[in-house]
Image: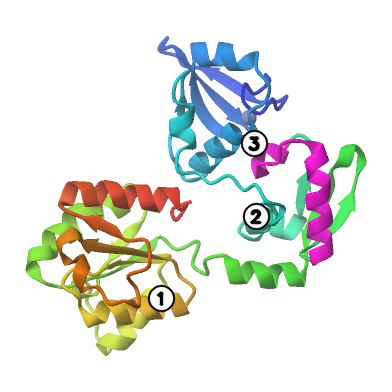
Amino acid sequence: MICPICKYQNAKITDNTNGADRSVILCQNCGKFEISGSALATLSNRDKDFELSYSIRRRYLRNERVYLNTTNRGEIMGGIEIPKRIKDIAESILKDVYTHDDMLSHGLSITNDNIASYAIEDTNRLQPILQYLEDIGWFKLMRFGGGGALLTITGTGIEYAESIVNPNFKSKQVFVAMSFNHELDVIYHEAITKAVEQCGLTPIRIDLVDFNDEIISNVLSRISQSRFLIADYTDNRPGVYFETGYAIGKGLPVIYCCRESDKGHIHFDVNHYKFIHWIEVGDFKTELVKRITNTGLNS
Ligand SMILES: [Zn+2]
């Protein structure tokens, strides 16, 4: 069938067996998503919607379940940044190739059929992007009919990818830096742990792990193996600044958090970052899940 969103010709549809008014669609651009009967009917008669296709794909890659109906397009696109400038699109192509072993070894074939995966609206727009990728030296290009090309990564491409891709993008571990004040245990267990686990990842807090090594080297090696760091500045502990600095030096993303009533104590070096200021367990957990998924840290 034709994908109702990106118009790819060979999408697959499975009707839900229990008679519910929704179908499951598998598309090479959009990924896997569910769609209501009325949305399917409406969108099938419309032009392709590459921005919605791109947003569904990002959510699918983060293992989120997407259900599209006639009213929730905005909700599905919420928090997803669509690359618009040539450089942003080029970087997203580079990241994609670099983080997929099959594309790294065999290259990426980019054609009119799959440009929606990279938020490219039409083939005319593809040409300047291919030109840019070639000129900047990230890829070797073999062009073929219909404006498509096979892209194979170069040494320059790998070098640049290493500087922009999280070095631990395959790790499931998330390091949590925070005060060990027992009053905050509930925050660790009920907000942070639950949010991280909901995103398919595993939190680690150093006081909860058995270790024989000297504490500092243990902390550093645990941070080095983590995908990202959650730094909670409540109680303003020096250790949290130290661990954050180490993570930044390692090129790892950091999510900054602090209890609303403690935010006045944060040192000026870090207080310009985008903090999650939480009031209680529930809102902290919700905001944390949102931040992890919206920034693609679990995809
Ligand atoms: Zn599609």
Q: Position of residue 279 (x, y in %)?
A: 16, 53
Q: Residue at x 24, y 70 (%)?
A: 233
- Mark 2 Cα shell of 10 Å, populated few (<14), some (14-19), many (≥20): some
> Where 179 falls versus 26 (above or below)?
below
Locate the N terminus by quadrant.
top right
Label 1 secondary element: helix
**Where is mark 3, residue-wise?**
29
Q: Position of residue 220 (x, y in %)?
A: 36, 82
Q: Amino acid at mark 2?
A: Asp
Q: Amino acid at mark 3?
A: Asn
> Is tag 3's residue or tag 2's residue first in the polypeptide sequence?
3
Write the start and end of the magenta stretch as one range: 114-136
Q: Are marks 2 and 1 in contact (CB under 8 Å)?
A: no
Q: Position of residue 27 (x, y in %)?
A: 62, 31
Of badges 3 and 1, the one in the foreground is 1
Label 2 secondary element: helix
**Where is mark 1, residue-wise?**
247
**Where is mark 2, residue-wise?**
88
* Residue 119 colored in magenta in the image: yes
* Residue 251 colored in magenta in the image: no
